[in-house]
Each structure stands twice: as C-alpha cells, then as structure tokens.
Image (cartoon, rainbow, N blue to C red):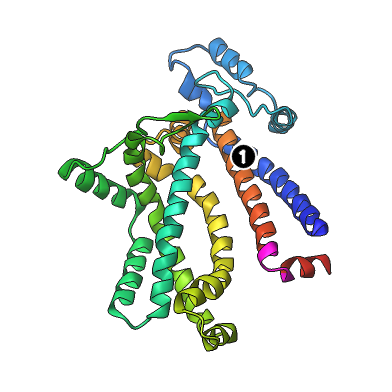
Amino acid sequence: MSVFIIRRLMQSVIVVAVMSLIVFVGVNVVGDPVDMLINPEADQAEIERVIRDLGLDRPLHEQYLYFVGNAFEGDLGKSFVFGESALKLIVQRMPATFELAFSALLMAIVIGVPFGVYAGMRPNAISSRTIMAGSILGFSLPTFWVGLMMIMVFAVMLGWLPSTGRGDTVEIFGIEVSFLTADGLSHLLMPALNLALLKISLVIRLARAGTREAMHQDYVKFARAKGLSETRVILVHVLKNIMIPVVTVLGLEFGSLIAFSVVTETVFAWPGMGKLLIDALHNLDRPIIVAYLMMIVLVFVIINLIVDIFYSVLDPRVRLKDAGQ
C-alpha cells in the first residue's frame, strides 16, 4: 500500500510542476493588462512605470522562476486590480464554491443512485424508461439556459425561491456556510440543482448499467438462493459492487464541479471563485487567473490521489497490480 501511495504522490508532484508552467505561460502570453489598468491618455513614462511595478518588464522565464520561488512560500502574486494577495482573494471565495459543489455532488448521489438502481432492476417499465429519457435531457440542456428557466419559474413566476446571492451565513471553525440557515438553504437550492443536473444524469446511467450487470452475477443469484430479502440483496450485494465505478467517476467529477461552476455562479450571482475568475478575465488580472487555475489543478490532483487510494481500498487488485510493476 505504501508503494502505491508513494508512486501516486510522485506522479502528482510532476503533474503540478508541468501544469504550473503551462498555466503561467498560457496566461501571460494572452493580452496586455497594462492597457486595462492605465488611463488611455497616459504618457510613455507612466506606462513604463506601471509595467515595471507589475514586474512585466522582465523576460517571461524570469517571471516564471520568480513565480515558482514565491509559490513555495505560499505567494501566488498580487492582484493587479485589488492590490491584494491573489491567493487570499481565492481562499476568501473558496468556501462558497466548495459549498455549492458539495451540495451538487450530494444531490447527484441522493437522486442519481436510487433512480439508477430502480431503472436497472426494472429496465422495461415505463417509469424506468421515463427516468432514462430524463437523464438524456440532463446531458443535453445547456446549464445557463436551465439556470435562467429556474429563475424565471421558481423565483419570478412562483416566488418560491430567491434568484441570486448566497443568503444568510453562519461561521463554523472560521468558515462561513449558508446551508445551516433557512435563508441560505433557500438561496443554495436552485444553483446546486442546476450544477448537479449533468452529474445526476451521469450517475443514473452508471448506476443503471452497474445494476444490470450485477443482477446477472453469481453472487446475487447465490444471495437470493439463500433466501435473503430483495432489499438486503440490493443494499449489501448490488450497491457495494456498483459503487466502485460510481465513486471513481464522482471523485473526478467533483473536480469538474468546482472548475466548471463558473456558469452557475455567474447566472445566480453566487459569490464564489468562478465569479471572481470572470471579473479577473474582464480586467486581465493575471495573478488571480493563475492562482485560480493552480488551485483547480491542485484540487484535481488531490481528488485523483484520494480516489486512487479509495479505489485501491475497495478493490485490492489495483494496488497489488501497481506494486508488482
């Protein structure tokens, strides 16, 4: 097990190093932030002063080495617009994004797994066909359009839910969360569901396929032959086996929930990292863009590492095969 974890850690370090180079170079060769930050009527001396203050007068490789050196000290640069640490601004918005992503992931599990198992056990039933048709819609409908329709129906026409913002929050261990207040929960419901729709559809199809395969396996037949109830067969034997691919995919998809929550946060004015990124892109605020992308890379790497370890616990053949290479 230790060999498996060490090998994964080494791979993760290499991925972060390579991605830091790609992200930094990719962001710094696009656009000129000086044009966005100074008065169009500024003279050449003023332009040169701003370029020098921002450190943009040095060659790109020197800027990268300076960035890497500061990154080891926890400094990912200072925002051109806000004049504050880019990492600090990202961390301030991170709880809102993580809360939204966790809520969407929970919805995907709570809704997707039961519906998928039901559709897998009764594949020819009209209700199962309806569930699968609904999952296709979840894949097909654009997130921004669904979000706008939710706002129009549930906020404007029916007046059941608030349309934008995060609502009231409470502080737990220094982190503000909104799901523990009634107002915050009402603000969270629509954006979380909007973000979760694609993942719900994915989980439904994964759970259905896994259930269809598991129902024909010998261990399920033996469990039924021993006289176990259908509920016990499903909960103990079927779910345990279909959850391996579901856990793997959901672990990877959690990273995408965080990375691609930008659209949902913009539609619902959710004060998370995605909203901050959109503002940074408008102003070509490179330090915030780089800090955001590096945080997303770290999230993906950490999630992949956790999923690999968890997967090896669920299926020991994975780590045994890796150790034998």
Disc 1: CA contacts within 10 A as few (<14), some (14-19) or many (>=20):
some
Q: Quadrant of residue 130?
A: bottom left
Q: Is 143 drawn above or below residue 130 in the view shown?
A: above
Q: Is 82 drawn above or below residue 179 in the view shown?
A: above
Q: Quadrant of the N terminus?
A: bottom right
Q: Is 85 placed left or right of 133 in the picture?
A: right
- Percent x, y of residue 276: 46, 32
Q: Quadrant of the C terminus?
A: bottom right
Is residue 82 on the magenta stretch? no
In-front residue for pair 274/157? 157
Q: Is 262 placed left or right of 17 in the picture?
A: left
* Residue ranking furthest to the left: 157
Indicate the secondary structure of the residue bearing disc 1: helix
Q: Is 92 drawn above or below residue 126 in the view shown?
A: above
- Percent x, y of residue 77: 63, 26
- Residue at 36%, 41% (x, y): give it: 188
**Amino acid carrying mark 1 in the image:** Met
Question: Would residue 260 be seen by someone viewing this image from the given angle?
Answer: no
In-front residue for pair 66/36? 66
Question: Would residue 239 be seen by someone viewing this image from the given angle?
Answer: yes
Figure label count: 1
State the extent of the magenta-drawn residues as a range: 312-317
Q: Quadrant of residue 162?
A: top left
Residue placed under numbered mark 1 in the picture: 294
* Principal secondary structure, stretch drawn in magenta: helix
- Percent x, y of residue 186: 31, 40
In-front residue for pair 107/64? 107
- Percent x, y of residue 229: 47, 79
Q: Quadrant of residue 218?
A: bottom right
- Residue at 57%, 26% (x, y): give it: 88
- Residue at 84%, 69% (x, y): give it: 324
